[in-house]
Amino acid sequence: MFIRVPGDRSVCREEGFTLVELLITVVIMGIISLSLGSAFTSFLQNTDTTIRRLYESHDAQISATYFAQDVASVGDRDSSDVLLQSVETSGTAQFPTSCGGAGDPTPIVGFAWDDPTSTTASSLVRVVYLIRTVSSERQLHRLVCLGSSTTPSSDTVLVHNVSITAAPTVTCASPTTCAGTGSAVPQSVTLVLSIKNPATTGAAMTITLTGQRRQT
């Protein structure tokens, strides 16, 4: 008769998994791994899309702030304090908005205003919005030129990944003619453009920039 002494480890259990149990475990682990892998891949894709949309929203907010401030400042005046043409579209030459390099594309829209330097003097400020292609990325740039200089004093990238399929549009209101002078200088200006990261699926995001002229 075999008597087991407490604490004696000389007797080992030989129980284990059967082949059927092992196969079932392998199948179940495969199903779980496949589901987790799909969920993780979907999570990464959704995260990338969300990050890209956040960047697009940031561009929209920044560009809207700059544009509203520029339109609010519009107002280039002559020596008689009469408003000259202060808004230009499609590169028309009614007022000198040339600002930037010789290789730059035609500006989408340009603004001009007088910046007081003293109680009796002021300096002309010209701002143009144009699209440059940098490393295959279409960017909306805001250039600022002071006085008669055509060399920008600042060059700010406002929007990345401007869509190539939808051309930006500029509209003016009160009156609808952007090239007015005097009382016909438009009260508001709106720029509409679309942006879309090439890696993003779905429709492009439309940005509407608008501003109200402060000067009368």
Image: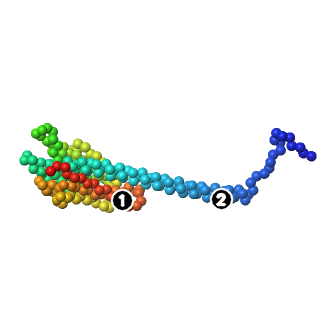
Q: Is residue 42 visible?
A: yes
Q: Quote the CA–CA distance across marks 1 and 2.
A: 43 Å
As drawn, is 203 to the left or to the right of 214? right
Mark 2: few/some/many CA within 10 Å (<14, 14-19, 20+): few
Q: Residue at x 20, y 51 (%)?
A: 213
Determine contact: label 1, label 2, CB under 8 Å. Answer: no
Which of the pair 216/13 is nearer the observer? 216
Q: Residue at x 41, y 56 (%)?
A: 199
Of all residues, the one furthest to the left in this rendering is: 80
- Residue 188, x across and y down, in percent: 21, 55
Quarter occupied by residue 24: bottom right
Q: Which label sits on residue 204? A: 1
Disc 2 marks which amino acid?
Val
Q: Residue at x 25, y 59 (%)?
A: 169
Chosen colour scheme: rainbow
- Disc 2, SS: helix
Q: Which label sits on residue 128? A: none
Q: How many marks?
A: 2
- Disc 1, SS: loop
Q: Residue at x 65, y 59 (%)?
A: 27
Q: Is residue 106 visible?
A: no
Disc 1 marks which amino acid?
Ala
State which tag comes first along the sequence, 1 or 2.
2
Mark 1: few/some/many CA within 10 Å (<14, 14-19, 20+): some
- Residue 115, x across and y down, in percent: 17, 43
As drawn, is 149 to the left or to the right of 63? left
Of all residues, the one furthest to the top in this rendering is: 118
- Residue 207, x across and y down, in percent: 31, 56
Q: Which label sits on residue 27? A: 2
- Residue 166, x across and y down, in percent: 30, 61
